Image: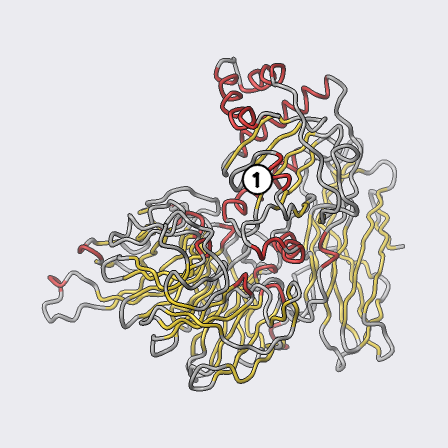
Amino acid sequence: MSADYLYYSHEKLQNFIGQSKNADEGVMEYLRNVKYASVHDFAPGLEWFNTSEPLSFAKHLHGKIVVLDFFTYCCINCMHIIPDLREIESKFSVEDGLVVVGVHSAKFENEKISSNILAAVQRYNISHPVVNDANSEMWKNCDVHCWPTLLILGPSANPIVMLTGEGHKKDLIIYIKNTLKFYKEKGMISNHKLPIKSAYHLLPDLKGPLLFPGKVTNILDENNHEILAISDTGNNRILVLKEDGTVMEQIGGKKLGFKDGNFEEAEFNNPQGLTFQNKDVLFVADTENHAIRKIDFKTRTVVTVAGTGKQGDDQIGGQKGPLQCISSPWDLCIYRTRDMDLTFHPDGNPPIRDVLIIAMAGTHQIWALFLEDTVWWKCKKYMAGTCINIAGSGREENKNNSYPNSAGFAQPSGLALCQKNRELYIADSESSSIRRLSLADGKVTPVVGGDRNPQNLFAFGDKDGTLFDAKLQHALGVCITKDEKTLFVTDTYNHKLKRVEVTENTVSTITVPAEDTIDGTTSTFKEPAGICISMDNKKLYITDTNNHQIKVLHLNNKYNVIKIEKLELKSLEENKQKIKNSSYEIITGKPVKLNSTGGKIILSINLNLEKGLNLTNGAPQNWIVDLPDVTWSSVPKNGTDLTHIETTINVPNHINYKEQYVDFLFDLLTCTTDTCLPKSFLIKIPIKFEATGKSNVAENINLVMNSSDIKVL
């Protein structure tokens, strides 16, 4: 197989399209002329996810059009194409002849470990097969050079076309549609199934309601009590807690989506960063909705203040927030600055303006959302609601510069504000460094980590030291002490907590009691991401993402860790949220008996339609789990695939309860030969708690439905 041929084939395909009457005809002509070759099969012994056995081109993938997605799970560009692949898989099924295979070829050492890849597959809701190409054998075999790369293969593992980067969804749909047609006409496409098995069944016992929590922030309420806000990323919700773990509010979380409204109606999509403007307003970086959301605790509503819900590629900005397309905002902070137009304030005391600073990971920049009319750098006036880039060229690099738009970042993912010096500290994850942005003049300077060469994004490691001699590995979180002299950093892929002295540009590892093992090395954390410091400077709150926990680290006055504990979440009785289901036909299932100390329930539902009744082809078919309160969790919580419905429910300690209910809600559109029949029904499953009950239970529920009736067998 010629590497050169693979690399230029996309250009050649585009040339064929340009010379034809339409794209379909161009692709078909290209396929008639494409050179024949084949890639080597996957090496034996590789670890696979979302399958019950390793796949091979010779056995499983022969007769299929295969899209190889070469990715590494840290990469924001790789994350961006996951929704595209999901949409393509909804158009072309395995039985139609299309298979997407994720080939994970790691950038960071931490990403070569299968347990970490498994967590990423679960976190990103990837349902297609994924293989750990730990030694990059398939990467080299196919002559891949960058992430992400997509390689379409024919039914004999013959390369069709290679595409690099993101943004190819429309082209992919055209190429796949015509490639399937071309080879079907030759009788070379098979409709056989694959041994798919969801990786969700490998989730550990969560022992709590959180699922891959992303970020954490805090504020004092009117009584000087500390309030925490957590982005419960995997559950697509925001939780507001007392410092003892009592859940005061749940915002969103019923299902993944992009919807404003009250706290129960609102929907998020993998939210990350949060920051309080005051005790009544919390801003959220709704990362995969490519939006900034405002939570108002007075009106109990969520509104979108920036972003359209779709990924943008604008690297300049300047429009009013809800009209401005943005890309994967990852963290936020509030900067308070004096209005710089002194001509209107002759007393020399211009008013303080609030500016929301955004780590825009998707375009490798730092943006600002002006919450008020503000005169800022170079006395330029920004109207309230303006969302604009303030630093970063948009090129992915580790470039420091006196001019903000000439500097370069690499997936900035964490922010900490030094208000006194008007400086912003940035966890620049893909350069594995901490950077400094002056909010007085826009100058960007190094703090620790990375490399002097701005193009070197592989200067990572685990080494204490000064400036470029120090090494981090994909750090995602940063916070600053109240005296604004010391930073704490979640060194995410090293599973460690680091301390940075900002005036000395030094980093040192903080000793924390070990609890778990990562690849043979003891560690308290598994890819910790978010971090904030308590208002009294005595505690650190850390989102221990892959442990699905919030850890609380108690500090002495020298910032040494003297105690570590897990924050246990508790529910306020009055805040139990149940979906309004009065319009649903209610069917009670048989009780599930569980130990009163809690545990895990694996529920499977099989839906059987009697002869003459079918699901309406192409119509939305949805199911969702409604749990008793926020201390329960289920994975997954909702879905659209009715061929195999299975969810794992984690149940907290219920010694004081005898019975609770888990509800499965279905919204289906069915049809007979001459009639469309909407079906909305609820399966109410009693959970009975007994001292002698099991702590792990698997239960199958069989539903039989005809045009007029639904039964539980």
Q: In the depicted view, which residue is nearer to us: 638 or 56?
A: 56
Q: Which residue lies at the image location 33% right of the left edge and 54% below the top edge?
A: 385
Considering the image in quadrants, where does the N terminus appear? top right
Amino acid under disc 1 = Asp
Vertical order, 650 against 84 (above or below)? below
Q: How many marks?
A: 1
- Left or right of 229? Residue 117 is right
Residue 706 visible, this angle: yes
Vertical order, 538 against 652 (above or below)? below
Q: In the depicted view, which residue is nearer to us: 499 or 566?
A: 499
- Left or right of 623? Residue 71 is left
Q: Which residue lies at the image location 72% right of the left edge and 53% below the top edge?
A: 199
Check the image and name the residue furthest to the bottom: 557
Q: In the depicted view, which residue is nearer to us: 541 or 161?
A: 161
Residue 388 image point, x, y percent:
32, 50
Q: Residues within 10 Å of mark 1 (few under 14, many from 20)?
A: some
Colouring:
secondary structure
Check the image and name the residue furthest to the right: 713
The image quadrant that residue 109 belongs to is bottom right
Residue 56 image point, x, y percent:
75, 37
Query: Tag 1, which secondary structure?
Result: helix
The image quadrant that residue 171 belongs to is top right
Considering the image in quadrants, where does the C terminus appear? bottom right
Residue 437 image point, x, y percent:
31, 60
Residue 36 image point, x, y percent:
65, 20
The image quadrant that residue 90 belongs to is top right
Vertical order, 518 against 511 (above or below)? above
Residue 582 visible, this angle: no
Per the image, the residue denoted by label 1 is 84
